[in-house]
Amino acid sequence: MNYNTLISAETLNLNLNQSNWVIIDCRFSLANPELGKNAYQHGHISDARYAHLDNDLSSQITDFTGRHPLPDFRVLAQKLGVWGISNNSQVVVYDDASGAFAGRLWWLLRHWLGHDKIAVLDGGIQAWQKQFDLVTTLPKIKPTIFRPYLNDSQWLNAIQVQNAIAQKKICVIDARTPERYRGEIEPIDFVAGHIPHALNRQFQLNLDNGFFLPIEKLRAEFQALIGDTKTENVVHYCGSGVTACHNLLAMEYAGLKGSKLYAGSWSEWIRNQNRPIEKVQ
């Protein structure tokens, strides 16, 4: 069986010794970028490798990008091979933030690089620790070759988003907290507000006590939000293109497939002062 949205701790444990399964620890903190790697070194799921959001899952920031630009797909594909991921691997990714960071690698692999067999650990490392032990032993990795099947139709750039909004072709969903969406506060980026006409669904609404909501509830809530919009015309964004993947994952888990990512997100949008912004008064 292939897992391509969520997987439980119990199912992961049953498959720990499968030779074609690869586990990736994606823990990260925006406030302390090395915190996740330090946590990994002090204890992780057996045989897990570590992926750093800034160093592995993003490229360098420029004057025109957001805070987490998409990585060079060739560099990422090479790293995947170094981590022992082949095109036949079942990949499981986890973090300690209910998928907020692991969802980034899920999207990169599944939707951008065309690897179907990747799932996020539901409940994260906390769910694992309630039943199973962590280890400090580093994995013995047998490098392989990962061949990407690049699909750039799964994400939009700022110009595409702006044009599609003007033509009323897309429904844009902002995954940030309501107060950031409204423009009342902005703790990270230098401009507050949101993309005009965007709707707000903070990604935390997908969760109950750290686990994803039941499929039926997620489906009902997203359908109520997007109305008659076709799922392929739904575009997700957040601060830097990371937690937006959580909403995309939640929709896909609920059977609402085909939505896309505005990869640059708010931190890229505001780099150009000619792009409009909105605030809720």
Image (tube, rainbow, N blue to C red):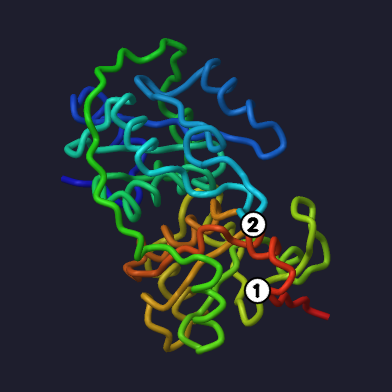
Amino acid at pointer 1: Ile
Locate the N terminus by quadrant: top left
* Residue contact between numbered discs 2 and 1, judged by CB atoms under 8 Å: no
Q: Is residue 91 left or right of residue 171?
A: left
Task: From the viewer's side, name the closer residue of 209 and 233.
Answer: 233
Tell me where residue 110 appears, x and y as whole percent. Answer: 32, 51
Question: Mark 2 packing: few (<14 Cα in 10 Å), some, or many (20+)?
Answer: many
Task: List the residue tagged with mark 2.
Answer: 239
Tell me where residue 75 appears, x and y as whole percent. Answer: 39, 35
Sequence order check, earlier mark of 2 and 1: 1
Circle on res. 261: none
Q: Is residue 71 left or right of residue 204?
A: left
C-alpha span from label 2 to label 1: 11 Å
Task: List the residue tagged with mark 1.
Answer: 195
Disc 1 secondary structure class: loop
104 versus 193 height, above or below: above
118 versus 65 height, above or below: above
Residue located 74% across and 77% down the image: 278
Question: Mark 1 packing: few (<14 Cα in 10 Å), some, or many (20+)?
Answer: many
Task: From the viewer's side, name the closer residue of 137 and 183.
Answer: 183
Locate the C terminus by quadrant: bottom right
